Amino acid sequence: MKIRSFGVLALIAALTLHCCSAPTPGVLGHVSPRKAGMNPDKLVRVDSVINKAIADHLIPGAVISVVRGDKIVYLKAYGNKSVVPDTVAMTTDVLFDMASVSKCVGTTLSFMQLIENGQVRLTDNVKMYIPDFAPWTDPETGETVDITVQDLLTHSSGLSPYLTVNKVASLYGEPCPDSTMHFIATEVRRNFRPKTDYMYSCLNFVTLQNILQGVTGEKLCDYAQHHVFDVLGLKHTCYNPALTRPDLMPLVAPTEVQADGLPLLGEVHDPLARRLNGGNSGNAGVFSSAEDLSVIAAALMNGGAVGGRRILAPGTVEMMARVPSDNDPQIGRALGWDIWSDSSWFKGDITDRTRTLNHTGYTGTSMVIDLTSKTAIILLSHRVHPQDKGALARVRATVSNIVAASVED
């Protein structure tokens, strides 16, 4: 498969961005569904659902991993990794552009470490770290309310969902990470009083990225790599593989075909992350495989550690999985993860309503982690290949129901 050529700015980024150092090997063990307390005759029904989605041209291919406790019980590839410029079969070790699942496995897990280390508090006002960060202002009374770290993590800040990438790029050039943060801090609309409502926003997580970078002195991509991915021994997880890990490129699934007729490959699909932040971004940018994400899921289901490798304390995981009591209950978001918001439908009808971490990615990725039954469902696809036309809504929920119903003890 051909790789798209990179411009001068991307080449400069390749020389300055060190986001994917070689990790230490480490994977979960595999057991049969029966040994893990799951019914294999029920579990195998996911095959027909995913294969139908491929036959209906909703997705070109997919990989599923089902985890129980600290073991993978079902790992399977379907369809094709690519159909443009060549047709290449899917394999279980393929790396996918995780899109917004990056918010969870990259930004959130990194940020939770700052909180448990005493470097940041959930109640801290964002302007403690980004001084020009504007508060919400009541349009009737003029009252102002500062936005906190917790508001960003739970999407209750009121920040608008996104920004016009072409507008910001025309003002500041690209990439322009510092100017992008200044624009978010000073120009982006605050739509409601913090903690009273929910508006999913990529800008929340770009802001968290900048807080982390200011506190640690490291780029988010470097911090996540060194303190999360490498600690867990992940072999196929990083930011910016096209620029920093050419050895992984044969395993990367392409996304959308661009104007030159070639798909994006190893560059994050999200325009804000790719064009404005150069691939190091709080809202998107992680590339990972089903097995590596299974390790992350197992660590969270087992109190922050798996196989002797710890990334978070048990209490931190519990805190991360709770919907904050001072937020309006309708919000339904925990710290970085969804729990029961109106966007969490894809976790299905059978998983624990209040203790199931879940998140999707625009490209076609999703994670569902039921902390009660200690069952995780990682479904990875690239619905945006070759064009941004595919859909996975019903497929995700149906797969979640089948897996959850297969748990027998």
Image (spheres, grey):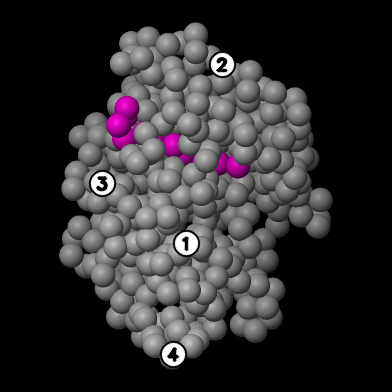
Q: Say the numbered circle drawn on residue 317.
A: 3
Q: Residue at x 43, y 24 (%)?
A: 404
Amino acid type, label 3: Val
Q: Is residue 265 above or below residue 407?
A: below
How far from the left and from the top, in percent, is residue 147?
Answer: 37, 75
Task: Please name whichever residue, 259 or 334, is drawn nearer the observer in this view of the structure.
Answer: 334
Q: Say the numbered circle drawn on residue 141.
A: 4
For label 3, the SS is helix
Q: Residue at x 53, y 38 (%)?
A: 346
Residue named by callout 2: 45
Task: Please name whichever residue, 152 or 158, is drawn nearer the observer in this view of the structure.
Answer: 158
User: Mark 4: few, some, or many residues within 10 Å (few <14, many ≥20)?
Assistant: few
Which residue in the rendered view is the most extreme toward the bottom? 142
Give the label, 4 or 2, closer to the camera: 4
Task: Please name whichever residue, 253 or 71, is drawn nearer the observer in this view of the structure.
Answer: 71
- First along the sequence among labels 3 and 4: 4
Q: Residue at x 43, y 17 (%)?
A: 406
